[in-house]
Image (cartoon, rainbow, N blue to C red):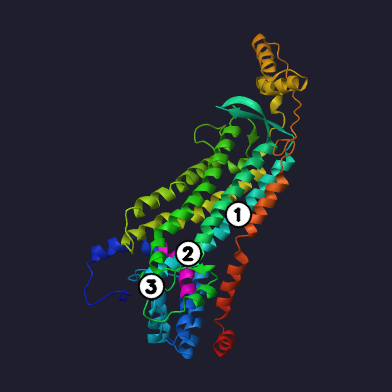
Amino acid sequence: MNHMKLWQKNIQVDKKVEQFTVGKDREMDLFLAKADVLGSMAHSVMLESIGLLTSDELRQLLPELKKIYQLADAEQFVIEEGVEDVHSQVEWMLTQAKGDIGKKIHSGRSRNDQVLLDIKLFTRDAIQSLVRQTSDLIDVLIEQSNRYQEVLLPGYTHLQIAMPSSFGLWFGAYAESLADDLLLLQAAYKICNRNPLGSAAGYGSSFPLNRQMTTDLLGFDSMNYNVVYAQMGRGKLERTVGFALAGLAATLSKLAYDACLYNSQNFGFIRLPDEFTTGSSIMPHKKNPDVFELTRAKCNRIQSIPQQITLIINNLPSGYFRDLQITKEIYLPAFGELDDCIRMTAEMMQSLKINTSIMDDDKYALLFSVEKVNEKVSQGFPFRDAYRQTAMEIEAGTFIPDKKVHHTHEGSMGNLCNDKIREMKEHIVTSFGFERVNAAIENLLKLCSEDSLDRRLQG
């Protein structure tokens, strides 16, 4: 089957050039299939409103586009051999089903604003999934923090034992860190949720496009108003969201490192369930924390995404350049990988076993030296005198720890403020506004039915 490119004239492209320029685009564009069809639905409705499609043509196109959407939703959408990208495949399928009407949907747009739109719609969905998974992980961490609030854990500075901590603090710290990460992700989401459709190749169109209509149909907060800036957003969006992904990944990576450290026999603070460990081919006793190690490695790689994208886009002037195609390979698969890491971390955090008698070991006695200093200060000693006396007891080997710890201020082990952290998380999640976006997409899909379309065309 010989497919024409959307841009092809009467010149045959060299096969090697075609393979080099298309690269992994057909593979990457499968991530964008649902988004591309949604964009074509909204664009077609708008084209009918300005007279570039008839109402009868729209009635034929929308149900056919919904069939393609359902294929993509069921992961059965295929970009055929000889078709270079998702945009070409959707138009080809429409043309095969409806003839020349299928060729009309490209009026007033370019593959430039199509891919911009697709990436934004894909990103919106992917962020929604990440937020849901992260919210669940925060709930697990807070639940574990409350459960083990009283269980003491050595706190370290410079990897030297420093002061008493607790599992309540440890779990809760990562919950609050992830809540902050969600705040950065929300900022990226708001930058994402602006409509570039109608900017065409980056300079607008002589057609009287109704950009507000497609903005409303697709549930965007607003449009990217300036058509040149809409195109300049390619790469910038991926970098911006990449920084937010990197923030989440950094928190998970640190948690994974802690867990690997605490699980080792030298520490023995936690124990991973056997099903989350793997064995050795030579050492029969080994139970390796491979899931956490792979989480750490994957999350460290995700942290490189904004730098990789920056190196691709940082010396480009305004306008479109093919360099931007390469950002897809870095950007699109990262969401699923991070999603998997968050899900696995939640399962492991919920299942790990806690050592409740860590402080029985005398090597942790000096953790309580600051408690002794503070006790003397409470009795009226100047802090420096109390510090010096306690230091002399330690040097003389006469220090006797009091392992009862009384911390009551906000955020300390006796007053974790987990209810405040959960409340903060819930506020951030709610203020993304996913419900409004989801309702818009649901309404757009409903519009493909004959009754809904009739009501719109008549109203």
Farthest residue toward the right?
379
Q: Is residue 73 left or right of residue 93?
A: right
Numbered label attached to residue 143: none
Magenta stretch secondary structure, dominant: helix
Please state which amino acid type lies under the numbered disc 2. Lys
The CA span between labels 3 and 1 is 35 Å
Which percent across, then down, holds residue 117? 45, 68
Q: Which residue position holds label 2? A: 120
Of labels 2 and 1, earlier in sequence is: 2
Nearer the observer, disc 3 or disc 2? 3
- Please identify the quarter of the rendering in which residue 431 is found: bottom right
Which percent across, then down, holds residue 229? 40, 64
Nearer the observer, disc 2 or disc 1? 2
- Please identify the quarter of the rendering in which residue 11 is found: bottom left
Estimate how packed mark 3 is, as few (under 14), some (14 to 19) or many (20 or more) residues with alpha carbons within 10 Å.
Answer: many
Which percent across, then down, holds residue 454? 57, 88
Quadrant holding the N terminus: bottom left
The CA span between labels 3 and 2 is 15 Å
Q: Which residue position holds label 3? A: 200
Per the rendered image, the range of residues in magenta is 28-39
Please state which amino acid type lies under the numbered disc 3. Ala
Of labels 3 and 1, earlier in sequence is: 1
